[in-house]
Amino acid sequence: MSPREQESERRPLRVCSTPHPRATIRKTFRGIARQCHALRVYDEEDFRKRRHSMAQWTFLTNHAQVLLFIAHHRHVTTRDIAAAVGITERAVLHIVRELEDTGYIQRFHEGRMNRYEVDLSRPLRHPAQRGQPIRELVALLEHYLDGTPPSS
């Protein structure tokens, strides 16, 4: 421990008894700001390392994953969907609500379970595929959900 640190430990902390309390407060805030900046720099470096090591992305969004799972499994709980897609139950509820609000699915409560009906005639939303029904996407990927190869 340096002599300066030893001296600061022995000195009692003066809060408002100094002649210029604003100067003391400014020094305190500067010290806190330096500590926060040091933490932020560490967090940014750590974030960059994690981002590069865990750089994973998928072709299908969570909305598409949830829709495909519901199309394949009509009677399912949000917990089952969350486990299959790899997102939280809260995120599943949000996505299901959005899909329901836009008319892609209808939800029917049957006890603890929900029964879903997917409107396969609804169009895909991206401008590049606008007008194409989701039926084609579901049919294409449903083979992989079943584990059977698509027929050529």
Image (cartoon, grey):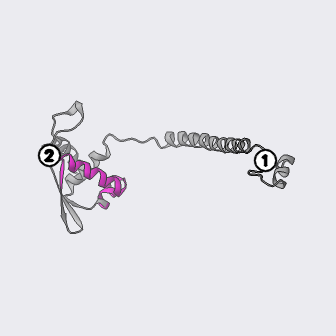
Secondary structure beneath dot 1 equals loop
Query: Relative to 91, does residue 56 appear above or below in the rendering?
Result: above
User: Mainly helix, strand or loop, the magenta region?
Assistant: helix
Report the side of 50 relative to 28 (left or right).
Answer: left
* Three-letter residue code for mark 2: Leu
The residue at which mark 1 appears reads as: 18
Report the side of 45 relative to 88 (left or right).
Answer: right
Provide residue 24's location: percent of width, then percent of height. Answer: 73, 44
Report the side of 55 relative to 75 (left or right).
Answer: right
Please state the extent of the stretch shown in magenta in the rendering.
79-107
Query: Relative to 130, does residue 122 appear above or below in the rendering?
Result: below
Provide residue 18's location: percent of width, then percent of height. Answer: 78, 47
Residue found at the very far bottom of the displayed protein: 111
At 74% across and 51% down in the image, what residue appears? 15
Q: Nearer the viewer, residue 4 or 39?
A: 4
Q: Earlier in the sequence, mark 1 or mark 2?
A: 1
Secondary structure beneath dot 2 equals loop
Q: Is residue 83 magenta?
A: yes
The residue at which mark 2 appears reads as: 120
At 83% across and 53% down in the image, what residue appears? 11
Identify the disc placed on residue 106.
Answer: none
Residue found at the very far right of the displayed protein: 3
Q: Nearer the viewer, residue 96 or 86?
A: 96
Q: Is residue 98 magenta?
A: yes
